Structure formats: C-alpha cells, structure tokens
Image: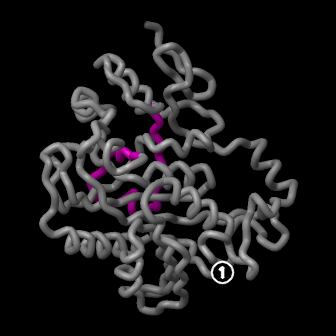
Amino acid sequence: MKRQVTELATVSRNGGSQLSGSPVQLSTTNLLNQQSINLSNSELILRPNGALYHLDLLPGQVAETIITVGDPERVRAISRRFDKLELQVEAREFVTHTGELDGKRLTVISTGIGTDNVDIVFNELDALFNIDLERREVRDKLTRLDFIRLGTSGAFQSDLPLDSFLMSEAALATDGLLPFYLSGGEPDEAAISLFEYLEDGKVQLLVPVLIVRPELPPAFAASDLPRGVTMTASGFYAPQGRSLRLPSGLSPDLLSRMRSWRHDGMRITNIEMETSGIYGLATALGHRAVSVSALLANRSLGTFSSQPAETVEKLIDKGLALILNS
C-alpha cells in the first residue's frame, strides 16, 4: 500500500484522515477574527462580578507560573509549602491557590480528571492574561505562561520502576480533544513512525495517531529527569487497556506492538489522562508546558505502589525545586 501524508497532516490506510501530529497550530484566520471582533456573551462567559465562568477567577489573581494537578487535595499539599498564601478560590472541581515561595509567585490549580477539564482550565487561564475581559477583545501584547503538571500515571514499560518520576517529552493524544483545535502543519515524525509501525504489525489505534511536543520550561528541559512519550487516554478503564466486566478495544497484540515501538530513542513510557491536552493547548496558545508524573502503577507487570502518598509528596518537592531554579 502506498503511504501518504496529506496537507492537513493526516494519513490513514485508505488515504483518509487518520494520523495527525505536531506542530499544533491555531488557525491564523481564527486568531485574526478574534482580534478584530468582540467576543460574544455566549463565547466568553463571565460571572456577574466579571470573573471567568468556570474558574471564578479575575485578572491579577493568577501567577505566570502555574502548577496544574488533577486532585483538588493536591492543591493544598502544594500550597502549604508556600511562604505566603494570597488567594484561595474553589469553584466546582477547580481549586486555585496563589502564593509565594522563596520570592517566586506561583499558582497551583486543580484541573480534575481528563482533557475535557483541561480544555476549560487552559482556555480560561489564557483568557485572564491575553483577553481584555471588559472589552472582550484579544490583547495586542500577549503574555507567555509556564505550566507545570505534577501528576500520577501508570508505567507502560516493564523496566520503569514503581515510585519513580518521568517527564513527558511528547504526548500521544488518544483522548479526542486536539483535532478540534488543529488547523494544519506537518505531522510529527514520531507520529508517522508509530502509525507505520502499527500498520506493519497489522494493528491500529482506534483513534487518529497524533503526537504533540511542547516547548519545555528551561529548568525542566535541562533536568536529568527520565523522559518518554506519554499516552493520554480518554478514560481510566478500557481507553487505557483495563478490563473489569467489559472488554477493552486495546487488544494485547496492539499493546505489545505499542510497547516495542522506538523512534530516535523515544518510546511510549506511561499512560494518564491530561498531558496531551496540556501540551497541545499550551503550544497552540504560545505557552510553555511540562508534565512530570509519579509512576504509581506498572501496567506491563500488573503492580501498584505500596506508598503512593509518600511518592506524590516527593514529586511535589522535586517539581518545586526545579521551578525555583527556573
């Protein structure tokens, strides 16, 4: 079969739209339109006090360095390390604390689970800095933010030990969010490589193969953290290959083929539910982002950490140390 990559960075067995990859871009036309018109009440939804609808935050309440976590309780675990706490806001599953540590202003916010929540959090946080909420217009001068995800995930490879840390150098998006934002660009070479490798093994993912890579914050880019490609799933059970009473569409043959894929020293190392949304939206909006995970499970070996809380505390300390070095 002849392999082809279309102008829209897509490819499939029949030449259709089944593979997408970096670079992730917003449509230039859309950006120009947003800058030239007021955003309607139904597009940019604000509370009566002018705060963003879901996060209940106002301009000035969030730092330019933002730590994201899934669990609202982890927000408190991080902010209790701050020297000073200036803001605490809770709205649904979105808990936001802003404070200062060693002279650096930081915000930590819970996204909840999944890229559907990441979609809300990243668009609204970007709006706090880059949209004039009173005039409902995109600002002429844009602010670049740093996002640091400190989360948990399951190792995909048998040699990755429980309770270790891993930094995502790229994300395999199997969750379905990013195709709604992509507007073109050549696919990442790793995405092409993975697609062809799966095809050669006569297996395929149930969703388009899409890999995104962010611009990492400098301190993390220079760190000695182990790296890998993180698979972001749309759910915890079948989308990650788990099966309780219902079977998963990720067959053993597909999972085995995915584990054995290699490209320029890269491999799929772990599975979780937020990183591809974080990387795709941060890149599209012009921000830097990094996702660092504590590996609490090893999916290849069927094992789980005996000390998950202690491991997460160590992850927080490691993440904050790198942030303060940036």
Q: Which residues are magenta?
A: 209-233
Q: Quadrant of residue 131?
A: bottom right
Residue at the extreme front:
245
194 left or right of 147 in image: left
The amino acid marked with disc number 1 is Gly
Residue at image point 28% right, 37% down? 247
Q: Quadrant of residue 294?
A: bottom left
| Figure check: 246 above or below 220 | above
Secondary structure under tag 1 reads loop
Front-lying residue, 17 or 137:
17
Residue at image point 33% right, 55% down? 167
Residue 210 located within the stretch drawn in magenta: yes
Residue at image point 37% right, 79% down? 78
The quarter of the rendered structure image containing the N terminus is top left
Residue 251, position as x, y percentages in the image: 27, 30
The quarter of the rendered structure image containing the C terminus is bottom left
Q: Is residue 237 visible?
A: yes
16 left or right of 221 in image: right
| Figure check: 280 above or below 259 | below
Q: Which residue is mark 1?
A: 60
Front-lying residue, 249 or 298:
249
